[in-house]
Amino acid sequence: MKNRLEALKAKLVESGLDAFLVTDIKNIRYLSGFTGSSAYLAVGRTSACLLTDSRYTLQAEEETRGSGLRLKIYKRRGLEEAADRLSSFLCSRVSSRGRPSKAGFEGNALSFDDFTRLKKSVKGANLKSFPTVVRALRRCKDAEELKANVPIAKAGALADAHATLLQFRAQLGEGGRRAHAGGDVVHALVHLVQHR
């Protein structure tokens, strides 16, 4: 999970952002490992914080252990506390640069009302919607995902073998199937697979 967060932090720098608010629960799970149904993930250039409610305290501690995330249990409306965390990331950047900060958020996973609250909470920051930044990271599978997807790789190999067999049967035609019974069929199939 640490590598995924680091990749997002690199995207922040690349996009000229100082912080990013992840609100899509699928993306939060991808970046943090947290599988609860209510959370926000505030990511700064050098640190990140998972915010969730008290129902998930133990689960969040266990699932994010070793991820490098700070964990905060919110006591009031989660978005406001997530915005506060985002603001703290932005304030540290403002003081070091002397100009307004820029924050990104997942515009496709935030209601208009929540966007209005977020904008009010991070006064003076430029907010920009980046709805696909985490989705783009998710497209490139890391070693952890590839290891978990071994059955998918086996299914792909099986599908390839089936496609080869169907191609072979189509090439033989009905008369060829009768004429190539026995060892000749095996030899022809091996030849077809090798030259595919």
Image: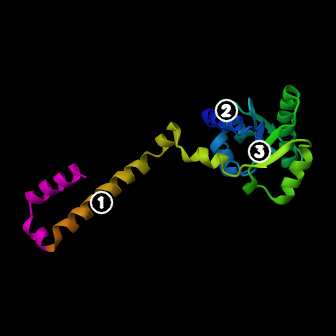
For image coordinates 17% across by 71% down, the residue present is: 173
Which numbered disc covers residue 170?
none
- The answer to whether residue 153 is left or right of residue 138 is left
Identify the amino acid type marked 3.
Answer: Gly
Which numbered disc covers residue 162?
1
Q: In front: 162, or 94? A: 94
Name the residue beneath numbered marker 3. Answer: 104
- The quadrant in which residue 112 appears is bottom right
Decide which of tag 2 and tag 1 comes sooner along the chain: 2
Instruction: Report how far apart the C-alphas of labels 2 and 3 lie in the structure.
Output: 26 Å
Identify the amino acid type marked 1.
Answer: His
Decide which of tag 3 and tag 1 comes sooner along the chain: 3
Q: Are marks 2 and 1 in contact (CB under 8 Å)?
A: no
- x and y percent of residue 167 in the render? 25, 63
Quadrant into which the N terminus falls: top right
- x and y percent of residue 9 in the render? 69, 35
For image coordinates 87% across by 33% down, the residue present is: 99
Q: Nearer the viewer, mark 2 or mark 1?
A: 1
Disc 2 element: loop
